Image: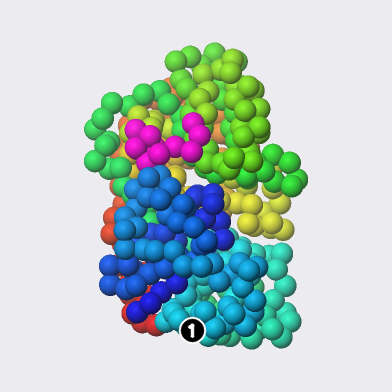
Amino acid sequence: MRIGIFDPYLDTLGGGERYMLTIASCLSKNNEVSVFWDSDNPLKEAEKRFEINLSGVDTSGNIFSDKFSFSKRLKASKEFDLIIYLSDGSIPLVLNKLIVHFQFPVEWVDYKNLLSKFKIRRINKIICNSLFTKKYIDKKLHRKSIVLYPPVVSYSSLHNLKKENLILTVGRFEKLKTGGTFKKHEILIEAFKSLIKNGLKNWKLVIVVSHKEADEDEILKIKNNVKEYPIEIVRNATWSVLENLNKRTKIYWHAAGFGEDLEEYPERAEHFGITTVEAMSAGAVPVVIKAGGQMEIVDEKSGFFWNTREELIAKTLKLINDEDLLSLMSKNAMERSQLFTGYRFCKELTKIIDEE
């Protein structure tokens, strides 16, 4: 079967891109798989950053770019048996089988016109990355979607290695129009500064960010803002760097959605939380905001939820000051993470495709 895959965010290589390119890698074992993009640079970079085997995947001209007219796109789509499309809210019209993947709620999109309804009817299957996303997509599109949790690499073999007094957070750098960042780096920085000012010693916060060249100045501003504190900014980390950080980390922080009206803008919460699961698999205890997909990952035995900065600080200190509790929750976090790791992703994906 010839399969085409489209991801409009390939130039940023975040968790969604790992999701789509893992789909490409899985399906390339028994199918001819092409990624719609006008260069192969993202694939080369993704192989290095994510350590995904994309040797069986090639690139095809991006039929969803403005260079392709509507008629030309329809004609080109006929060359494929199946297209898997990561939606940014848009839904394509193609002349083959179509699976649309949603990574987040798209509450701002109006699908009420006749053309949109026609496009939705032509979708063969809809896949979501979490129950959180599914709830909004099913209601919005009046269709029942399938949840395929993201591919998560387990670091469980690393848990016996020596841990350090590190707090880790990982995420894409993305500014919000309302101010601040999607991952709320600024909130975590201020919380850690508060801990240091109130006497915390011998602990370090590591912030791993993936970003575009256009964000260079903003990243430098963040680095200047933290230079007087034990805070390290790691940019566009390779897989080996992430692996090393996860094996050394004791506590994992996440704050996406903090201070946002998530009833009105649910897309501003974390849609799943791949990096949370990865950190847990290496034995880091998650202290994460009680919102979005994080609530599907963490339970009361494996980590802490918080709603305010004060709770974030208090629950972090609770772990720091109680080594027995930290050790117990670390073991529980590793066990909990196994629900989302391993070979599950390719197996479930293949079943979805075979049933099509």
Which is more toward the observer, 200 or 317? 200
Quadrant containing the C terminus in the rendered view: bottom left
**Compared to 339, does 137 lie above or below?**
below
Q: Position of residue 170 (x, y in %)?
A: 49, 39
Left or right of residue 354: residue 186: right
Instruction: Name the residue: 34% across, 72% down.
Output: 32
Q: How is the image coloured?
A: rainbow
Q: Which residue sits at x=38%, y=34%? A: 241
| Quarter of the N terminus within the rendering | bottom left
Q: Position of residue 13 (x, y in %)?
A: 49, 50
Residue at the spot of label 1? 78
Q: In this view of the protein, can residue 62 be seen by the observer? A: yes
Start-end of magenta stretch? 234-244
Relative to the observer, which residue lies in front, 193 or 22? 22
- The image quadrant of residue 35 is bottom left
Identify the residue at image location x=54%, y=83%. Answer: 75
Relative to 80, say whether 307 is above or below.
above
Determine whether 1 is above or below 106 in the image. Answer: below
Q: Amino acid at mark 1?
A: Lys
Of residues 163 and 236, the one drawn nearer to the viewer in this rendering: 236
Is 237 part of what is drawn in magenta?
A: yes
Residue located at (51% from left, 67% from top): 61
Is residue 5 found left or right of 264 in the rendered image?
Answer: left
- For the image, the number of numbered tags is 1
- Could you tell me residue 340's position as x and y percent? 36, 55
Q: Is residue 272 above or below residue 28?
A: above
